[in-house]
């Protein structure tokens, strides 16, 4: 349609609206600015034709809302995976080692992965194990439940239940509910039978050799002791990937340590040694080297990783997946820009948060990033 035709059509419309009060007309028919060239348009996946799951996932970026946030998470993680020191320029401050082309091409972004205990209880455990087994992650941070539930699953299964099951009835049956999952209390009895002799051995080694146990050393030891390839921490121990858990006593492991303190008192677990080690995981990654954070859920794992990256004035890449909101001032619900104000994420970074259930989003994220784009380490 020609410009003259459009002009004539608009003139006709305005004539037809001549009786409308000017204020109302101006407010409703406010002139828009021209959108910048290349601005993405909204378009979702069209199911016409053969099913193409890859194309469906790719279309999430242009679908809007949290689907678009998920697409941005995919891009952010892929940027973590793609980055090499060779992407950065060399200047007068560059160390001699960092001038070597082979070294520069081999040095990657250091990736911190944090997750809450409910995700180990769920099927996300299998995706976490995949990442650890294949050395795709450099540092893990979780909660006490995120440690013990992995080992407990090696001893006995967790079952699907329902969110609506009544707590009083479940208690009578010795069944513990985690959302819509069920864990028989007998599983924790089996866990006690398994862990108590290990705690005895650790106490003996402490007394005889002077070893100083820390949460990360305890988790490493338990990973070796479980000797089960289904375990996340078996693979973390085997691949020498550190696992930090500053709240190690806040769960069944804490119960076991409590009981052990009566049975065989004296075992010491040093938190200070671990907070130094955790902070140094980030601090020693000097510029222009980069760190990335992938955080599932909130609470201790989220803040522990963020705070470690404060020691280097912020992470370079950041992805968060949780359902928490910021209106109550919680760190769990805080948007990434709040972390920028604390120096925990770099001001020039492009962090992303998707408000969604990680049990849905994380498998899709792994499929779109690590599974497709991770290059095996030598």
Image: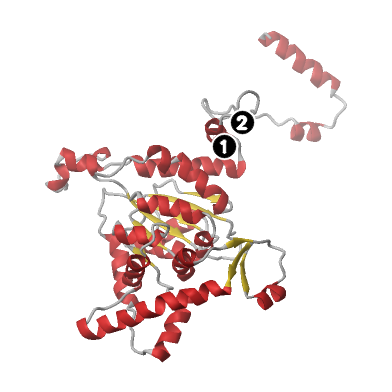
Q: Is residue 81 visible?
A: yes
- Judging depth in this view, the residue of 69 and 31 nearest the camera is 69
Is 90 rendered above or below residue 330? above
Q: Secondary structure at mark 2?
A: loop
Residue indicated by mark 1? 60
Q: Is residue 286 left or right of residue 115?
A: left
Quadrant placement of the N terminus: top right
- Asked whether the beta carbons under mark 2 and mark 1 sit within 8 Å of each other, the answer is yes
**Residue at the spot x=32%, y=70% of the render?**
221
**In which image quadrant can residue 266 be found?**
bottom left
Q: Residue furthest left?
A: 96
Is 312 rendered above or below residue 14? below
Is 308 rendered above or below residue 186? above
Gap in Å between the C-alphas at discs 2 and 1?
Answer: 8 Å
Q: Is residue 292 visible?
A: no
Q: In x, y percent, where is residue 192?
A: 46, 78
Chain-order first, disc 2 or disc 1: 2
**Residue at the spot x=34%, y=39% of the render?**
82
- Judging depth in this view, the residue of 147 and 57 nearest the camera is 147
Residue indicated by mark 2? 45
**Residue at the spot x=32%, y=74% of the render?**
214
Q: Secondary structure at mark 1?
A: helix
Quadrant placement of the C terminus: top left
Q: Is residue 223 left or right of residue 207?
A: right
Q: In x, y percent, where is residue 376?
A: 30, 42
């Amino acid at each position: 349609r020609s410009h003259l035709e459009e002009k004539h059509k608009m003139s006709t419309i305005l004539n037809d609206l001549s009786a409308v009060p000017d204020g109302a007309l101006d407010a409703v028919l406010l002139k828009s600015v021209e959108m910048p060239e290349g601005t993405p348009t909204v378009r979702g996946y069209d199911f016409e034709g053969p099913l193409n799951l890859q194309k469906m996932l790719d279309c999430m970026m242009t679908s809007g809302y949290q689907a678009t946030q998920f697409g941005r998470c995919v891009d952010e993680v892929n940027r973590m995976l793609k980055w090499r020191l060779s992407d950065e320029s060399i200047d007068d401050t560059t160390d001699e080692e960092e001038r070597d082309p082979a070294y520069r091409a081999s040095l990657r972004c250091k990736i911190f992965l944090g997750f809450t205990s409910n995700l180990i209880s769920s099927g996300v455990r299998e995706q976490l194990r995949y990442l650890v087994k294949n050395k795709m992650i450099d540092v893990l941070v979780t909660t006490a439940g995120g440690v013990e539930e992995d080992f407990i699953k090696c001893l006995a299964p967790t079952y699907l239940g329902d969110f609506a099951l009544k707590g009083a009835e479940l208690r009578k049956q010795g069944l513990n509910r985690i959302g819509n999952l069920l864990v028989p209390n007998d599983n924790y009895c089996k866990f006690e039978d398994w862990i108590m002799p290990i705690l005895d051995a650790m106490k003996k080694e402490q007394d005889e050799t002077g070893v100083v146990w820390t949460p990360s050393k305890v988790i490493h030891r338990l990973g070796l002791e479980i000797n089960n390839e289904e375990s996340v921490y078996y693979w973390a121990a085997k691949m020498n990937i550190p696992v930090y858990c500053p709240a190690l006593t806040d769960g069944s492991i804490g119960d076991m340590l409590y009981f052990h303190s009566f049975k065989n008192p004296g075992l010491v677990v040093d938190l200070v040694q671990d907070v130094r080690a955790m902070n140094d995981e980030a601090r020693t990654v000097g510029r222009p080297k980069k760190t990335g954070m992938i955080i599932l859920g909130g609470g201790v794992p989220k803040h522990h990783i963020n705070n470690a990256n404060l020691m280097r004035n912020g992470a370079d890449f950041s992805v968060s997946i949780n359902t928490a909101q910021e209106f109550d001032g919680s760190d769990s619900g805080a948007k990434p820009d709040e972390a920028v104000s604390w120096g925990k994420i770099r001001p020039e970074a492009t962090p992303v948060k998707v408000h969604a259930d990680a049990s849905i989003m994380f498998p899709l994220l792994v499929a779109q990033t690590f599974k497709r784009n991770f290059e095996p380490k030598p």
